[in-house]
Image (cartoon, grey):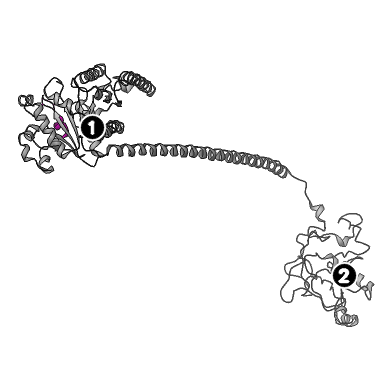
């Protein structure tokens, strides 16, 4: 019988069951029986194919043979010659040591000797591979009736642990190919990549160490800056606390209660900040005293004291003296004064120069007597003509003498001559206790092309200016210090321009502090006034 798809006749394959005889008288079995190998030939990772029941499972060997079953564990065959004469898969009797189906079964005698290569002189013809146009597939199931001789015997793929494989029976070491150029290149470049990766790892480690070192250094520098800033802040806070404590003591001294204290601000010539000193001194005292402070403009040549403070009324000192009986209360007296926000008051002089020149010593005495009834601290701004009869009454009603001066040469000379006049015409004790506020009037001289001057040049100019002013102040202090009670320097302030409206809030903090020092110096003389009987 032939297969329609094969040019060769279909031969029956020998059965692997000893109970089924192979040969012309046996029933042909279609399909391919898997060669039965010893138990140790199967890979350890796969289970051994299932087998029919054997005597080991409870059936006797004679029963297994009678049922046509093959016992793979049997150690003998009933008729070895019959097995040797059974045809193989291609009609050739199997050789000794082969299993049914024509496949070699390794045994004790053949396991060590390798099989001869097909085509060699010692090779049997029946072991040569198929060289026809198309070899019959050894493992093709052909449907329900052309299946495997034993369904429990399934084909298995060759594994590296098997001594035979589907590649012609060669072992795994024989199939290894020599290492090619691609593998060598991969090994070479793989080594270079490893070196590159190692180099990058070293660079990353070095970079990480550098960043850690830099971060630690920055943290240390930041901590040092914070420490320095904290110390500077603490020092500044201590200085501020000290300054505030000094100011508190000063303000407390200015607020010392006193029955009456008369302060005269005098100068032989105008333009030496005389009116400015009166306004600033009166404001500083009014801000820190609980009572009111008054200033009388005694200039016989049309004074500007009320105008620079801000006039609230047109009444003058002449109007107050003309109606002395009508002023019986503080409210009546308040109608004749102009008051600033600091509660500092000014009694204006006569606006008509002809009438102002007729202001006599008696009128000044009357105005002073009325003012002392309602005010405790009274300042008098004298004119520049110290020869007027009015000045006789002023000399006799002065508790503290204030002589303004400037850092200019002529300003210092006029202050010195004013002290000489008062020393000759009044009590020399007033000169020894006098207060000389020296105002700096020279500003920092800047070049015209200021835009083209760099910061270093400006710093040099400022340093030279400060050095020059310090030298001038020391010169004035050395000259006036031994003669008067106190010399107080007032820094340059643009808001203290001549003839302008007086604004205490517009002064610099340094100027305010200087004028508060003048007020403090005046307040120190309150004790002497309180000690005099009948004052």
What x and y, as percent, mark residue 3?
75, 70
Figure quadrant of residue 13:
bottom right
Q: Residue at x 52, y 40 (%)?
A: 223
What x and y, as percent, mark residue 230?
46, 40
Q: Residue at x 15, y 40 (%)?
A: 374
- Badge 2 local density, few (<14 within 10 Å), some, or many (20+)? many
Q: Is residue 191 left or right of residue 128?
A: left
What x and y, as percent, mark residue 351?
8, 29
Determine the secondary structure under disc 2: loop
Q: Residue at x 11, y 40 (%)?
A: 333
Question: In the image, is residue 23 above or below residue 216?
Answer: below
Between 101 and 453, the one nearer to me in the picture: 453
Q: Is residue 454 left or right of residue 7?
A: left
The part of the chain drawn in magenta is 299-309
Figure quadrant of residue 242:
top left
- Badge 1 local density, few (<14 within 10 Å), some, or many (20+)? many
Q: Mark 2 or mark 1, which has the lower sequence index?
A: 2
Between 16 and 525, the one nearer to me in the picture: 525
Residue 421 within the segment the image draws in magenta: no
Q: Residue 87: which numbered mark, if any?
A: 2
- Residue identified by numbered label 1: 280
- Contact between labelled residues 1 and 2, with CB atoms less than 8 Å apart: no
Please state, as top left, top right, bottom left or bottom right, where the C terminus lies in the image. Answer: top left
Q: Real-space Cα distance between discs 2 and 1? A: 143 Å
Q: Is residue 2 left or right of residue 96?
A: left
Q: Residue at x 26, y 34 (%)?
A: 531
What x and y, as percent, mark residue 270?
18, 22
Determine the secondary structure under disc 1: helix
Between 83 and 295, the one nearer to me in the picture: 295
Between 444 and 273, the one nearer to me in the picture: 273
Please tell me whether mark 2 or mark 1 is closer to you in this view.
1
Please state, as top left, top right, bottom left or bottom right, where the N terminus lies in the image. Answer: bottom right
């Amino acid at each position: 019988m032939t297969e329609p798809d094969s040019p060769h006749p279909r031969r029956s394959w020998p059965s692997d069951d000893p109970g089924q005889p192979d040969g012309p008288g046996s029933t042909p079995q279609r399909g391919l029986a898997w060669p039965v190998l010893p138990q140790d030939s199967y890979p350890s990772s796969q289970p051994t194919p299932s087998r029919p029941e054997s005597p080991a499972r409870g059936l006797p060997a004679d029963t297994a043979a009678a049922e046509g079953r093959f016992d793979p564990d049997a150690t003998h065959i009933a008729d070895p010659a019959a097995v040797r004469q059974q045809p193989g898969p291609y009609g050739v009797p199997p050789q000794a040591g082969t299993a049914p189906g024509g496949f070699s079964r390794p045994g004790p005698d053949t396991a060590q000797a390798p099989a001869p290569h097909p085509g060699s002189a010692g090779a049997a013809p029946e072991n040569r591979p198929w060289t026809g146009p198309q070899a019959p597939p050894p493992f093709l199931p052909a449907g329900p009736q052309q299946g495997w001789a034993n369904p429990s015997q399934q084909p298995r793929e060759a594994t590296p642990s098997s001594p035979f494989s589907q590649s012609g029976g060669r072992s795994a070491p024989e199939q290894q190919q020599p290492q090619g150029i691609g593998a060598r290149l991969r090994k070479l470049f793989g080594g270079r990549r490893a070196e590159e990766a190692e180099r990058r790892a070293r660079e990353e480690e070095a970079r990480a160490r550098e960043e850690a070192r830099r971060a630690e250094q920055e943290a240390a520098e930041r901590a040092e800056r914070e420490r320095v800033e904290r110390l500077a802040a603490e020092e500044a806070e201590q200085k501020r606390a000290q300054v505030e404590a000094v100011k508190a003591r000063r303000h407390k001294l200015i607020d010392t209660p006193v029955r009456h204290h008369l302060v005269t601000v005098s100068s032989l010539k105008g333009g030496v900040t005389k009116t400015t000193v009166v306004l600033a001194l009166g404001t500083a005292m009014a801000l820190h005293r609980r009572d009111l402070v008054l200033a009388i403009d005694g200039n016989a040549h049309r004074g500007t004291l009320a105008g620079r403070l801000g006039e609230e009324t047109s009444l003058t000192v002449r109007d107050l003296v003309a109606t002395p009986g009508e002023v019986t209360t503080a409210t009546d007296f308040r109608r004749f004064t102009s008051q600033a926000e600091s509660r500092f008051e000014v009694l204006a002089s006569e606006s008509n120069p002809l009438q102002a020149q007729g202001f006599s010593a008696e009128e000044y005495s009357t105005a002073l007597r009325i003012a002392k009834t309602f005010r405790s601290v009274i300042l008098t701004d004298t004119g520049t003509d110290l020869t007027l009869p009015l000045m006789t009454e002023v000399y006799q009603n002065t508790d503290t003498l204030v002589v303004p001066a400037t850092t200019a040469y002529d300003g210092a000379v006029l202050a010195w001559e004013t002290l000489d006049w008062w020393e000759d015409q009044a009590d020399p004790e007033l000169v020894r206790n006098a207060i000389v506020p020296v105002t700096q009037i020279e500003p920092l001289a800047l070049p015209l092309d200021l835009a083209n001057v760099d910061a270093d040049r400006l710093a040099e100019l400022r340093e030279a200016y400060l050095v020059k002013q310090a030298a001038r102040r020391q010169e004035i202090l050395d000259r006036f210090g031994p003669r008067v009670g106190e010399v107080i320097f007032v820094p340059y302030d643009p808001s203290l321009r001549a003839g302008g409206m007086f604004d205490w809030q517009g002064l610099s903090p340094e100027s305010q502090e200087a004028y508060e020092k003048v007020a403090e110096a005046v307040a120190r003389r309150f004790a002497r006034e309180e000690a005099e009987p009948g004052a």
